Image (spheres, rainbow, N blue to C red):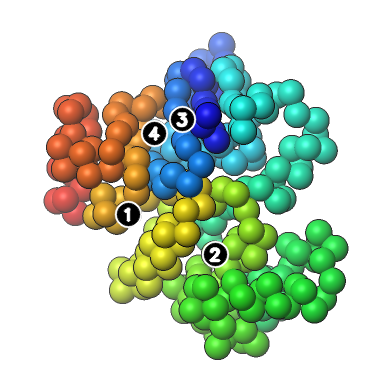
Amino acid sequence: MSLIQLKDVYKIYAEGQENQVNALDGVTLSIDQGEFVAIIGTSGSGKSTMMNILGCLDVPTRGEYLLDGTPIRERTQRELSQIRSRQIAFIFQGYNLIPSLNVWQNVALPMLYQRVPLAERRARAMEALEKVEIAAKADNRPAQLSGGQQQRVAIARALALSPDILCFDEPTSALDPELTGEVLRVIRALAEQKTTMIIVTHEMAFARDVADQVVFMDGGVIVEQGDARQVIEHPREERTRQFLARYSEN
Ligand code: ADP
Ligand code: MG
């Protein structure tokens, strides 16, 4: 059984109005436990909308989302908030670190809300910082770190919660090219641990080499999905080909 199943999911804004947007226009997708899925596509194609639904930050207008085989709409608010705080972690383009806290305190903060005792918070924060190779900066403030280092701290903050699913929405898009590599390296290392990971990315070589499955979206639909190398190197659909050609020009 798949960990994640979207069945004919729609997300419609301003339905029935002149400015209606079908951000998702009938999306069906399965993701297995331990799978690494890369979502690619142009701006406005529905990638973040789909990711937010997968991460239970948003709900479909229509269609079904099953997580662990259970329809999300059958969950209580309390269960959903548990899922959001324990089962699924997000890493966004912006790092959202708190400037007045040092690095390890930032990583430990979500555990505070879970009432983890201080000594354990600190130990788990340090362990997570070691995984992203930035434990040496534990006592620094975020402003003293480069963008790539700050993003690695944000990844550590997610890891410290031991989530079942890690969601990355364009984690390197705010970074200078020379800092992108260090973040992708960390994500690549995490992929080897076989946590379920979903990443929206414009790094095509990374998607090809590290992801199991690639999903190409356009206009709120999945145009093509399949084996990562197959989709990136030998796309079947014309729209995918055009998208990839535009990307290799840039
Ligand atoms: P992507 O992440 O691929 O750039 P998004 O999922 O953010 O795309 O957006 C998909 C479409 O939905 C876009 O046309 C966007 O303008 C629209 N959209 C996203 N959020 C909202 C909203 N809250 N209200 C209205 N339209 C929205
Ligand atoms: Mg987006």
Residue at the image position 51 percent from the left and 52 percent from the top: 195
Q: Specify the label residue 248 is tagged with.
A: none
Q: Nearer the viewer, mark 4 or mark 1?
A: 1
Q: Specify the label residue 30 is tagged with.
A: 3
Q: Are marks 2 and 4 in contact (CB under 8 Å)?
A: no
Q: Nearer the viewer, mark 2 or mark 4?
A: 2
Q: Amino acid at mark 1?
A: Val
Residue 141 horizontal/vertical position (percent)? 63, 83
Residue at the image position 80 percent from the left and 34 percent from the top: 77
Count the marks: how many? 4
Give the CA separation, mark 3 to mark 1: 18 Å
Q: Specify the label residue 210 is tagged with.
A: 1
Cβ at disc 1 under 8 Å from ligand 2: no
Mark 4, secondary structure of its residue: loop
Q: Nearer the viewer, mark 2 or mark 1?
A: 1
Mark 2, secondary structure of its residue: helix
Give the CA separation, mark 4 to mark 3: 19 Å
Give the CA separation, mark 3 to mark 2: 24 Å
Q: Mark 2 highlights which residue?
A: 155
Q: Amino acid at mark 4?
A: Ser
- Name which of mark 4 and mark 1 comes first in the sequence: 4
Where residue 16 sits, quadrant-wise, is top right
Q: Residue furthest front?
A: 1
Residue 221 horizontal/vertical position (percent)? 38, 25
Q: Amino acid at mark 3?
A: Ser
Residue at the image position 59 percent from the left and 71 percent from the top: 128
Is 228 above or below relative to 74?
below
Left or right of residue 233, residue 2 in this image: right
Is 161 above or below relative to 25?
below
